[in-house]
Amino acid sequence: MTAATNTAPKIAAATKDIDAATIARLEERALFVRLETLRLIGVAKVGHYASAFSAAEIFATLYYDTMRLKRGEPKWADRDRFLMGKGHAAVGLFPILADWDFFPKDVLDGYTRLGNPLGDHPDMRKVPGIDFSSGSIGHALSGGLGMALGTRMQGKDINAYVMLGDGEMQEGQVWEAALSAAHHRARNLIAIIDRNGFQLDGRVDDIMGIEPLAAKWRAFNWDVHEVNGHDVAALAALLRRIKADTAREMPVCIIAHTIKGKGVSYMETEPGWHLGYLAPEDEARAIAELKRGGAIR
Ligand SMILES: Cc1ncc(C[n+]2csc(CCOP(=O)(O)OP(=O)(O)O)c2C)c(N)n1
């Protein structure tokens, strides 16, 4: 174990390692996530805009730079796995899965409609490419640990990436999984905490504080990194470094500092946007703002 050296905070900065074309592509994909989130919630008439917006660059970087995937093959056994503790943000993930041809793109058009497999929360029995059904927050890290250990026992080289909310840190099961993962040296388990500071009904640190968060994960013997979760270059560089680190024996925790509602100004400043619906004229304004922002950093 390298726990003894794992004491100083590691803040990943944007890096020259990622070329300009890749950065532009990942930023375009994050914009795609946000625009599709707006479109799909427009169909459903209610949804978690702000939770998906804070995770847009994380989704984009994982699915278009980091993860091992094969187009049109959600059942490929050697595919990297992705689990969402904050399953309520799946509206931002479904368009990516359709873009990878895991299911037909027109399925998106019936998001949450009766008979459509895409619900407000992801269902692994219905949606190709969804690795874990979630919605009840707190369980995905345990699921990811099972996948990390199971695939390791099969001799496969697979990473399990688990996105967690910071409000989700208040769930006891997260910490049981954290303890267990370090004990089993699950080096192929990578947790990414979307540290946007808010949960459903207010600030995480007002409701039940979780700081010092990095120190907690370090104390649980995880390899801890912090990053600006809207900086695709920093995210991509960090995730590439983690993949290349073959000496590490511990699971990895990335604290991604983000803004809930990122990209739409009033959602960024008003915490009430956890769940909502935009009237068509407001949706049009949000789209215009996102497109004007273009590359959101
Ligand atoms: C076990 C459980 N308790 C309560 C909820 C209701 N709930 C849905 S989202 C949410 C807040 C999640 O906050 P966070 O994890 O920070 O996610 P984000 O703010 O990024 O959406 C809560 C409490 C739930 N889905 N599951």
Image (spheres, rainbow, N blue to C red):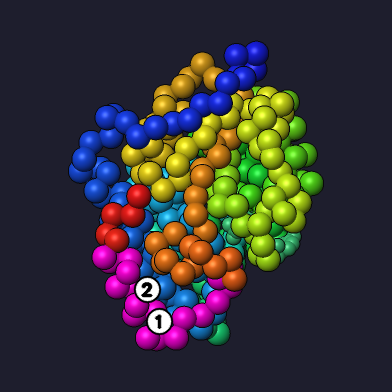
Q: Secondary structure at mark 2?
A: helix
Tell me what residue is drawn at x 35 percent, y 34 percent.
14
**Amino acid on which the number 2 mark rests in the picture:** Ala
Query: Is 262 rendered above or below residue 188?
Result: below
Residue behind label 2 places its C-beta within 8 angstroms of ligand 1: no
Residue density around tag 2, few if under 14, some if 14–19, many if 20 or more, within 10 Å: many
Classify residue 55 as left or right of residue 138.
Answer: left
Looking at this view, is 274 or 138 the one in front? 274
Query: Is 10 rendered above or below residue 273?
Result: above
Q: Is residue 172 magenta?
A: no
Residue behind label 1 places its C-beta within 8 angstroms of ligand 1: no
User: Residue 68 is drawn in which quadrant?
Assistant: top left
Q: Which residue is mark 1?
A: 282
Classify residue 196 as left or right of residue 142.
Answer: left
**Amino acid on which the number 1 mark rests in the picture:** Asp
Classify residue 113 as left or right of residue 215.
Answer: left
Q: Which residue is mark 2?
A: 286
The percent position of residue 6, horizontal first and vertical second, equals: 60, 19
Could one spot residue 24 in this view of the protein? yes
Q: Main secondary structure of the magenta part?
A: helix
Magenta segment, which residues?
273-292
